[in-house]
Amino acid sequence: MADRFELQNAQYQFPYHYLPHLEGGQARRGRSLRWGREYLCYLMLLADKVRALAPLSLLDVGCGDGRLLSLLAPDIPACQGVDLSEGAIRFARAFVPAASFVVADAASLPGSFDVVTAIEVLEHVPDDGVTGFLQMLGARCRAGGTVILSVPSVNVPLNKKHFRHYDRDLLERQLAEAKVAWRLEEVEYVYRQPGWLTAMDRLVDNKYFRLEISALERALWQHTWNRLRHAGPGDGRHLVATLRRAG
């Protein structure tokens, strides 16, 4: 009985019951994210940055469904996520039981943390709220702690959900205008998407069919991690800023 339970329990690493769905009158057996390889590369790079700091506490502002904390909660004693979306937090609590999650404005939280992350959140903040948002990140970070902030770059077309995309000048200007006592340690452009890879993805994953060959996917992932992870101002799709709070 116990063995059978564990076999079933192991299946719940992913909510697989939600994969089959109806779409346009057709029964679909899976869902596809064409940007999934980019997202996974970007996510793992961010997780590595946090782990390298060896924090005892972490706050992820705008945590969504908790995907980043799912990678970090096993390594950090106190992980907390905060988001304004009740639906997102319900998923986060289900998928990442090792972390704590709250539906709230991060400005209302007590205390401070060794590391504060805001991953692809700043672009959702209206222009007149940017300074206050950055000041809140500084307030939630303990003296000597680190803020890791990421945004989409201007190399990516503006998403209708976003107020702006960023180049380094704009990001640094907004950080300076916030007048928080932090030091900008690094700004890094992350992930580039070559044209041949875009064409290949469209060829094997489109509205008519999806083709996934294990050997090809392994090779593409290795190429992505080894060759496409780091980028420059002309082709990087994300900017990641690392800031040290003054002690």
Image (cartoon, helix red, strand yellow):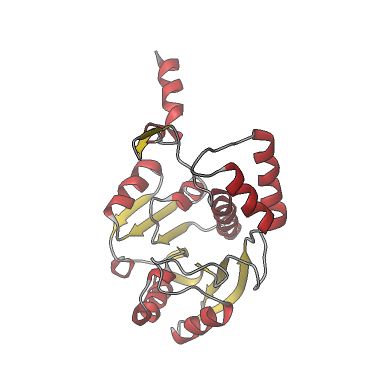
**Which residue is at the front of the view, 137 or 38?**
38
Query: Whole-percent x and y of residue 199?
Result: 63, 52
Query: Whole-percent x and y of residue 67?
Result: 45, 50
**Which residue is at the front of the view, 167 or 82?**
167
- Relative to 231, residue 10 above or below: above
**Residue most extreme to the top:** 1
Residue 155 placement: quadrant:
bottom right
Q: Identify the residue at image location x=60%, y=42%.
A: 204
Q: Identify the residue at image location x=33%, y=66%.
A: 106
Residue 22 placement: quadrant:
top left
Query: Whole-percent x and y of residue 182?
Result: 51, 79
- Does the rendering let one see residue 35? yes
Residue 120 left/right relative to 153: left
| Label total for image | 0
- Relative to 161, residue 4 above or below: above
Q: Identify the residue at image location x=72%, y=53%.
A: 226
Residue 49 left/right relative to 138: right
**Which residue is at the front of the view, 132 or 216?**
216
- Does the rendering let one see residue 77? no
Tell me the quadrant of the picture where the N terminus can be found.
Answer: top left
Q: Identify the residue at image location x=50%, y=40%.
A: 208
Residue 222 left/right relative to 78: right
Residue 119 left/right relative to 84: right
**Which residue is at the front of the view, 143 or 229?**
229
Query: Whole-percent x and y of residue 35?
Result: 53, 52
- Relative to 173, residue 119 above or below: above
